Amino acid sequence: QVQLVESGGGLGQAGGSLRLSCAASGSVFSIDAMGWYRQAPGKQREMVATITRYGRTNYADSVKGRFTISRDNAKNTVYLQMNSLKPEDTAVYYCAAIPLLGIKVPNYWGQGTQVTVSS
């Protein structure tokens, strides 16, 4: 089992910045990649950014150049630095862990943290 605990988020202004953190515990050796996903009201959950254990990153087109995902393997923590925020970034953001073995889709999720961007 893997536990993911998110922190950060809250209320931001358009053009501003926020930072999310996610600490993993438990069977962290089973994790390959970690990532951030988000779900806005009435919309499906979507991938925001992912990072593998070797630091390879992947971003949604909508956040490229604005968001940066990073990972501290020693602390089992992943971060999402969100700059140049837009109102359309408003969503619940979820941390996710993608397993080392098996299908490369998230199998553990955090509880979610609300990000609200005002215009």
Image: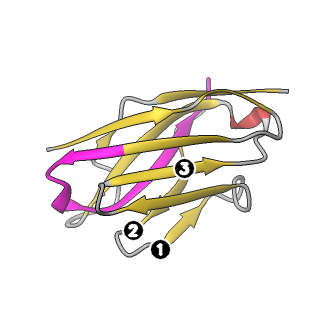
Nearer mark to the viewer, of 1 and 3: 3
Dominant secondary structure, magenta:
strand
Q: Quadrant of the N terminus?
A: top left
Magenta stretch, residue numbers:
23-41
Extreme residue toward the front, this view: 74
Q: Residue at x 38, y 61 (%)?
A: 72
SS category of the residue bearing label 3? strand
The three-letter code of the residue at mark 2 reads Thr
SS category of the residue bearing label 2? loop
Side of 115 where 108 appears, left or right? left
User: Residue under circle 2?
Assistant: 52
Task: Give the CA distance from mark 2 to mark 3.
Answer: 14 Å
Q: Quadrant of the C terminus?
A: top right
Residue 19 position in % (x across, y down): 58, 42
In-front residue for pair 20/101: 20
> Number of callouts in the render?
3
Q: Residue at x 42, y 53 (%)?
A: 78
- Tell me which numbered mark, 1 or 3, is placed earlier along the sequence: 1
Residue 9 position in % (x across, y down): 56, 31
Q: Is residue 25 above or below residue 70?
A: above
Residue 78: in magenta span: no
Q: Residue at x 77, y 39 (%)?
A: 16
The three-letter code of the residue at mark 1 reads Arg
In-front residue for pair 25/110: 25
User: Residue under circle 3?
Assistant: 80
Q: Are marks 1 and 2 in contact (CB under 8 Å)?
A: yes
- Tell me which numbered mark, 2 or 3, is placed earlier along the sequence: 2
Side of 77 where 116 appears, left or right? right
Sort mark 3 into few (<14), some (14-19) or many (20+) by Cα contacts within 10 Å.
many
**Numbered tag placed on residue 56 in the rendering:** 1
